[in-house]
Amino acid sequence: MGIESLLLTTLRMSIPLVIAAMGGIFATRSGMMAMGLESMMLFGAFGAVWCSYLTGNVFLGFLTGVLFGMVFGLTYAVLTIRFQVNQVIGGIALNLFTVACTTVLMQFVWGNAGNSPAVNSLEGSVNIGILAEIPVIGPVLSGMSINFYIAILLIAATTFVMFHTCFGLRLRMIGENPTAASTLGIKVRGYKYLAMLICGALAGFAGAYLSIDQLNMFSKDMIAGKGYIVVVMLALGKYNPVGAALAALLFGFSDALQINLQQMFSVPAQLVQMLPYIVTILVITFAVRHVKGPAGTGKLPEE
């Protein structure tokens, strides 16, 4: 198990977690739980493959994945804001619905409920000459997809918007005290809807990365709990973009480690594949027990 190989796999596995986590930051800071991330990522992954299959255009595939994620972000917002469904229940219900929905759609589109045929995917890597000369990590960075650099830009952009703009200030105020924000004339529900659209867009983009960048196909329930892992990451990173990104590296490393261990040792794959979820349980048990989200999570302004 070479260091370069482990580092490369860690970064690749972290990319979708980072992208989805940046969307989750917007949701949680506005007082919305990110429990529906799994559905947004899964539907985004399906939409990206479906469009790539129909058009052969990878970039349209990514755009479709973003739009499909936004659809479920908006659906979650309507359920929890307009109809005031419990956010945990609404998110889990959407996650379960999306698994069934994408399975039916696969059967309808491709006649196979297990996986799609191979489609056009994003190929090649970005080679930045200066970075390639850095010892150890240079060869790793030179082999990364463009989405790795997009993820880094998203961390910077999310940090700037959340902590250095009026929009971010209002969003954080809504998350802490929606009633006080409403008395100041801030349209609380409108900001929450917008936050969930942003969350859905980035989660859909993360799903598209999994299906037409990391892979070139869609398979049943391919997100495999990553949406729930992102929820844990957000708490571990204390709902801060940089903290969430560092948490993504931890989970990316656990994922990369189980892949490398499967290649090195003749052990049942199911045992090694448990590693990321064991890490998740340990983090929940020991690291995030006392981490509290925004005080106004799940609340709407008093009428």
Image (cartoon, rainbow, N blue to C red):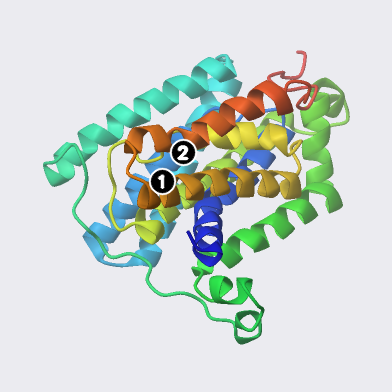
Q: Residue at x 58, y 25 (%)?
A: 281
Query: In the rendered structure, which amino acid carries the disc numbered 2?
Result: Met
Viewer-proximal residue among 185 and 167: 167
Q: Pinpoint residue 265: horizontal percent, then vertical percent.
A: 37, 46
Residue 303 horizontal/vertical position (percent): 75, 13
Q: Residues within 10 Å of mark 1 (few under 14, many from 20)?
A: many
Separation of residues labelled 2 and 1 (CA atoms): 6 Å
| Residues at marks 2 and 1 touching, judged by CB atoms closer than 8 Å | yes
User: Label 2's element?
Assistant: helix
Whole-percent x, y for residue 79 in the image: 52, 22
Farthest residue to the left: give it: 111
- Is 69 left, or right, of 181 in this rendering? left
Residue 161 drawn at (x, y percent): 77, 52
Of residues 2 and 277, the one nearer the viewer is: 2
Residue appearing at x 32%, y 36% in the figure = 268
Q: Is residue 37 visible?
A: no
Which amino acid does the dot numbered 1 rest on?
Gly
Judged left or right of residue 182, residue 88 is: left
- Snapshot quadrant of residue 109: top left
| Residue 142 in view (yes/no) | yes
- Above/below status of 159 relative to 296: below
Q: Mark 1 sits on what residue? A: 44
Please give the label number shown on residue 40. 2
**Where is residue 77, by image quadrant?**
top right
* Residue displayed at 20% across by 39% down: 114
In the displayed structure image, the side of residue 71 where residue 103 appears, left or right? left
